[in-house]
Image (cartoon, rainbow, N blue to C red):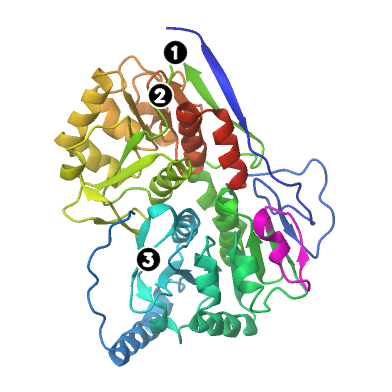
Amino acid sequence: MEGHRRKKLQGTHPHPVGARGVRASGTTYRSSEKEPPKEMATRPVAISTLRTPFSPSPPPLLRRLQTLTRALASSSPQTMASSPAPKKVLVPIANGTEPMEAAVIVDVLRRAGAEVSVASVEPAAAQVAASWGVNLVADALLDDLAEADFDLISLPGGMPGASNFRDSKVLENMVKKHVDKGKLYAAVCAAPAVALGAWGLLNGLKATCHPSFMNKLPSETKAVESRVQIDGKCVTSRGPGTTMEYSVVLVEQLYGKEKADEVAGPMVMRPQHGEEFSMKELNSTSWNVGEDPQILVPIANGTEEMEAIMIIDILRRAKANVVVASLEGTLEIVASRNVKMVADVLLDDALKQQYDLLLLPGGLGGAQAYAKSDELIGLIKKQAEANKLYGAICASPAIALEPHGLLKGKKATSYPAMWNKLADQSECKNRVVVDGNLITSQGPGTSMEFSLAVVEKLFGRERALELAKTMVF
């Protein structure tokens, strides 16, 4: 085996401005506090273009009665006596919403035990066409939740998603009433400037947003460049690359530091966000397959939504042709934290063409589905035998690849709790491992590094660095 080398990508981000870092990797600031000490301890706080038919909703009156009934049931004496009521969170989505941000917010808050309602602002349409060809299906229509009460409302970014939020009078009224009650509200990427700013909800506050929208923050707002900014009950952040930090900060605001630590640890977040990130490469070989690589990303019930959507989104940003294939009998799948995604095709149809690269997201249920699919495993074996490119992240290297001999003679990593399932554990502590035609990685918190490493191998370092900067990674 040839010697190995470590390659580094430099993620660029503005220097943070503000006060204290809230025990997050990266920099989170409260506007009311003093300058942080220089030696501040940190911790990790770290689908498709096809639409499925939409079933008609119940009549509006019936929908509202159903919503009220659920609300009354959740506040009954029996429920309150047995366990504390979960925090209720609203995450709206719209056509043009950035899917990475939406999925990360929902996933992380559900890990914390929050009752998250994903609501479509689109009229009578639960399915939205998010950015980068990713289709998501909401839990409810926003109109049906107009009178509901939440502990947190968090807006993902993306354009024109943020402008669709701004133009929704129902959402504007809900957020304003929520703020008037002194409750926690938050937004990331374009949404702080485009939606919250337009509604006058950042006046007199320190806030941040995506670098390209900083000049659109209202003059009454003190614009800062923190990766996550807290000012009173308002939390803002910068982009896809800061959303996991932002989401863990929201967990801390709702539940406290102990719960935030509990959620952050298993996600394998980067210890220092905004610093260098790297991949461990052995047996280096060219991945140059041209400017239009064909990439297959299978998804199934139980797939980890953060991992799947980051891979799809980032590779499509890099101009790769990504085909998302469902292993289920339908295009719609329910991911591990109940985010509903829509694939481009069913796996049987996907098998009719050839691919330059196959990438398996993780999630225990998804990885088990991959391992049981003779068709998919057969395709990966042909890929490996032809010395073509393949990879996996999180549970999938250990659950789907290792048992089928697809890691034989290869160095790899996986989700840390599954390292003991790897025959060769010599490189498993690396966050991203490339061994010839194989790439593997550890978990949700390494998904962006994993995807950028793929971009670098396919298109070169410059394009990977450009994407990292755009995403504020």
Q: Which residue position is annotated with label 3?
A: 128
Disc 2 element: loop
Q: Is residue 370 above or below residue 300?
A: above
Indicate which disc, 1 or 2, sits on the residue closer to the N terminus.
1
The magenta-colored residue range is 211-228
From the image, state whether disc 1 or disc 3 is nearer to you: 3
In the image, taking residue 251 as reference, residue 77 lies left or right, namely: left
- Looking at marks 1 and 3 on the same chain, the residue that comes earlier in the sequence is marked by 3
Provide the residue designation for mark 1: 283
Q: Is residue 398 left or right of residue 201?
A: left
Indicate the quadrant where residue 133 lies: bottom left
- Sequence-wise, the earlier of marks 3 and 2 is 3
* Gap in angstroms between the C-alphas marked 1 and 2: 12 Å
At x 49%, y 20%, the residue is 281
Residue 236 at what x, y percent from top left?
A: 65, 63
Image point 28% across, 32% down: which residue? 355
Q: Which residue is mark 2?
A: 412
Is residue 214 located in the magenta-colored stretch of the structure? yes
**Category of crowding for the residue at label 3, using alpha-carbon neighbours closer than 10 angstroms: few (below 14), some (14–19), many (at least 20):** many
For the residues carrying marks 3 and 2, which lies nearer the camera in this image? 3
Residue 320 is situated, as x and y percent measured from the top left of the image, at 40, 39
The residue under the point 36% across, 74% down is 140
